[in-house]
Image (spheres, rainbow, N blue to C red):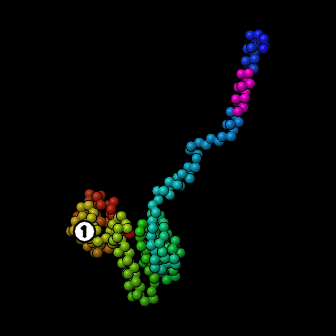
Amino acid sequence: MFNLSRQEKIVFLIIISALLITFSWKLYSKEKESITIVPTADMGESDIREEKELIDKKICIVHISGAVNQPGVYQLTEGERIIDAVKMAGGEMEKANVDAVNLAAHLYDGQKIVIPFISENKGDEVNQNALANEEVRQHDYSLNSSLLNLNAVTSNKLETLPGIGPALAERILAYRKNHGLFRNIEDIMNVSGIGEKRFESIKEFITVY
């Protein structure tokens, strides 16, 4: 149809190629402007970290009763303190004897917390606090806690620990009776027959509070 010379054909092809390249570049630039590339390192690191921390935290269900405004069962996280549970239960009542409770003690799943009342009759107060403490101790004997509380555990429970027989269990109880509560798990090495090697084998299974 068109009788073009060889030189005209070359010029025509160059023009067509230039037009195609220009069109392609404009199309690419438009698409690039509509896409926002976010570096992986900037994609909500704080959110990811917070979510991971929440996953790592273990749910802790505790029952708090006694001299608190809203006694009941509450969900907290393992590692929080008894004072946190008291606050969640509406705080202590006016006649609460908070000095009878270690508010700084850590919570554990299934724990029963009893906040005793202050009584005008000193004898009644002592009896009431003794009953509250006994209720807590009985709860500690249950399987709700995976660790054995050295300040409340029985002889039979102690015998479930590696290398602890009846005689050694009785020595641990005698030490607790004569010297008072264990302040930390390392204090158990003060009991005759429990050295560093035996302590290393049981330290992952015991606690104090």
Q: What residue sits 40% from the left and 87% below the top?
A: 124
Quadrant location of the N terminus?
A: top right
Secondary structure beneath dot 1 equals: helix
Q: Which residue is at the front of the view, 151 or 27?
A: 27
Q: Position of residue 32 (x, y in %)?
A: 67, 37
Q: Is residue 24 magenta?
A: yes
User: Which residues, given as a range, are shown in magenta?
Assistant: 16-27
Query: Furthest residue to the bottom?
Result: 121
Q: Is residue 76 left or right of residue 3?
A: left
Q: Is residue 85 left or right of residue 167?
A: right
Q: Is residue 126 above or below residue 204?
A: below
In the picture of the structure, the residue carrying the numbered disc 1 is: 169
Q: Is residue 92 above or below residue 3?
A: below
Which secondary structure dominates the residues rendered in magenta?
helix
Q: What residue sits 53% from the left and 75% below the top?
A: 90
Q: Which residue is at the front of the view, 121 or 39?
A: 39
Q: Quadrant of residue 205?
A: bottom left
Q: Is residue 144 magenta?
A: no
Q: Quadrant of residue 175?
A: bottom left
Q: What residue sits 36% from the left and 78% below the top?
A: 134
Query: Type of residue at label 1?
Result: Ala
Q: Which residue is at the front of the view, 53 or 185?
A: 53
Q: Quadrant of residue 157?
A: bottom left
Quadrant location of the C terminus?
A: bottom left
Q: Position of residue 6 (x, y in %)?
A: 74, 10
Residue 79 appears anywhere in the view = no
Residue 11 appears anywhere in the view = yes
Q: Is residue 118 above or below residue 83?
A: below
Query: Furthest residue to the right?
Result: 2
Q: Position of residue 30 (x, y in %)?
A: 71, 36
